[in-house]
Image (spheres, rainbow, N blue to C red):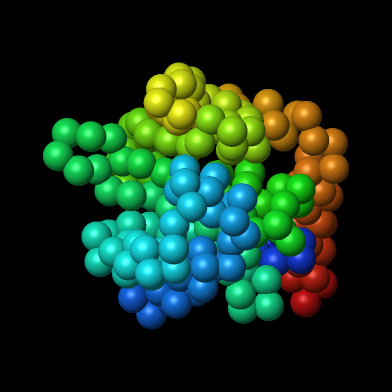
Amino acid sequence: MVLQETVRTAPGYVRTLIQQEELPLLRDHLLRLDAASRHDRFNGYLDDSFIERYAARCAEDGTVIVAYIVDGVVRGAAELHPPEDEALPEVAFSVEASARRQGVGTALFRRLIAEARWKGYRRLRITTGAENHAMRALARKFGAHLAFRQGESTGTIDLAKTPEAELADLAASPFTAGRALLSLNSTCWKIISSMYDNRAA
């Protein structure tokens, strides 16, 4: 079972995919990645047949896929891979060029962490290419401590510490905080209005 709440982030939204039914959405997204993005995602250039097999395996092994969707098309994805043997569950991210610099990575990361907590995971492992600066910055934003080894950046995320990173991010974004406050005020006024309407009736 996966979380089904949809989170809006203009111009698209973030939600968890139903793996078997929506497998083609992940596959097509990964196939659309340009050469540099594909290299960053898989730490090397890989052909289409590999990506097709990879997407099929994600649907079979219980991987949770959180997607950023615009007009029915997946433009970004976060993957939560189940742990193997004694290893930690692993996360991976990819965002198409058209969806970058819009807060998509942050929205995907937050939703993925919610999924991981729901499953009872305490720590996550993240691996990215040494040159993938955007992914490294995003991982550090959510508390990952990265180490370099053989051309890769590998680190862990302690889920118990993640809320602090999220609060810091909220405080650093006046637009996001203001929008949340307006939403709260709107909800409060609706409740108050309904109370008065009921009394009048």
Q: Is residue 76 above or below residue 197?
A: above
Instruction: Identify the image quadrant of residue 87.
Output: top left
Left or right, residue 58 beside residue 127: left
Residue 94's spot in the image, x, y percent? 55, 53
Q: Quadrant of the C terminus?
A: bottom right
Say which residue appears at 42% left-offset and 44% top-offset: 91
**Residue closer to the observer: 113 or 58:** 58
**Residue closer to the observer: 84 or 54:** 54
Q: Is residue 16 above or below residue 138?
A: below
**Residue closer to the observer: 49 or 14:** 49
Residue 134's spot in the image, x, y percent? 65, 37
Say which residue appears at 43% left-offset and 35% top-offset: 127
Residue 98 visible in image: yes
**Residue closer to the observer: 195 or 125:** 125
Residue 133's spot in the image, x, y percent? 63, 33
Q: Quadrant of the N terminus?
A: bottom left
Say which residue appears at 48% left-offset and 52% top-offset: 45
Say which residue appears at 53% left-offset and 48% top-offset: 39
Residue 107 visible in image: no
